[in-house]
Amino acid sequence: MKPDQNLVGLIRDYQMRKIKNVGVIGAGLMGHALTLVHAIGGCQIKMQDISSKQLSIGMGLIENALDTLISAEVVSKKDRAKILGRVQPIEKLEAAVTDVDLVVEAVVENVEVKATIFSEIDKAADLDVIIASNTSNLDIFPLVPERRLKNCLIAHWYTPPYIIDLVDLAAGPETDPDLLKVMEGFYLEIGKKPVLFEKFISGYVANRLQAAMGLEITKLLDEGWATPTAIDDSVKYGLALRMALMGSLMKADFTGLDMMQRGMANRTYDPPIPKGNSPTLDELIKSGRGGVMSGAGYFDYGDLSASELFKNRDIGLLRLKSEVAQIEGKYPLGKKT
């Protein structure tokens, strides 16, 4: 089989601007996970957080996640010490962004906090350092000092990023066009699935689709049309099973585009109007049912601890991911354009 020349070219672009040293700002939910992603990818990491306690928690979470990957035989046990040895926890932001090729911003989704972080990065980092923000929905480019915009982009991940390979790469109005190619090549080389956006759109693709689904789900719950079990069963055993192999538009191809066209013409679906809240959700939170970390949310999780639940989720996702990859290789559905 001939190598994909486009892929070869992208990796060549990345190799011309090798990324080996990475500073990760934030050691929380996404920060520790992105530290692990880049460490597994062979980079030396300085993971920064102003809280020594959070750094300790983050290192523990990294070890737990790595052990899960090892138990699922995704990472070799003999590489454990080497991967962990690439991670240096550090409290001073200035030290974290000095002598690195890439700075990954993974702090809370707050405009003021992010603006402060970008200002501090600007004071300490080399001028040619790449700055990648993990923002989910914020247009961070107006917050970034002007002289940094050329080498700044969004690299948005989905939790847990050491399992979910999708990464949204979005350019700002002044981002160097070649930077998208460099980052695409980098993440392809470490086994990820980058999707490129030449300009920022809030939510990218996956988050926008997820938000639209969320509006419909809360409407069904709040108005009493369906239970949490009915909704999740419909997703797991209907939508998700097919989409795992085909995505959405290929599924439409298999159904027949004329059916899609007729459905649109019939105008039988009215999307919910965003209300800014959900009575069902508000009541759950008020009653202390905040999700897995609380032991209950939309569902009860019995005697299983949060750590057990997250481990089981991760192993399940890894097995599903492996099975889908094998099926795609054995039963191809044609070339995607």
Image (cartoon, rainbow, N blue to C red):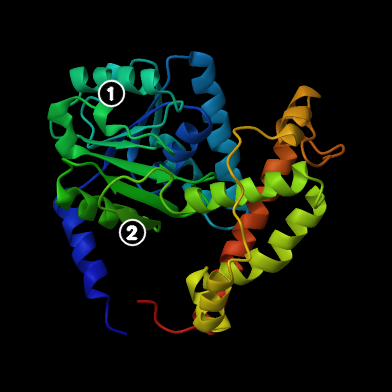
Figure check: 121 above or below 15: above
What label does residue 188 carry, if any? Answer: 2
Q: Position of residue 207 (x, y in %)?
A: 49, 48
| Residue 42 coordinates in the image, percent (x, y) | 35, 47
Whether residue 236 sits left or right of residue 87 in the image: it is: right
Query: Can you identify the residue that label 1 sits on?
Result: 118
Q: Please name the residue shown 74% across and 27% down the image.
A: 285
169 up-or-down from 174: above or below: below
User: Splitting the image into 4 quarters, where does residue 122 fall?
Assistant: top left
In front: 37, or 179? 179
Q: In which quarter of the image is residue 297?
A: top right
Residue found at the very far front of the displayed protein: 266
Residue at mark 2 to residue at mark 1: CA–CA distance: 26 Å
Q: Is mark 2 on a helix, strand or loop?
A: helix
Question: Is residue 54 visible in this depiction of the protein?
Answer: yes
Residue at figure coordinates x 26%, y 42% from the top left: 20
Q: Is mark 1 on a helix, strand or loop?
A: helix
Residue 294 visible in the shown view:
no
Query: Residue at (15%, 52%) from the top-left corner?
Result: 178
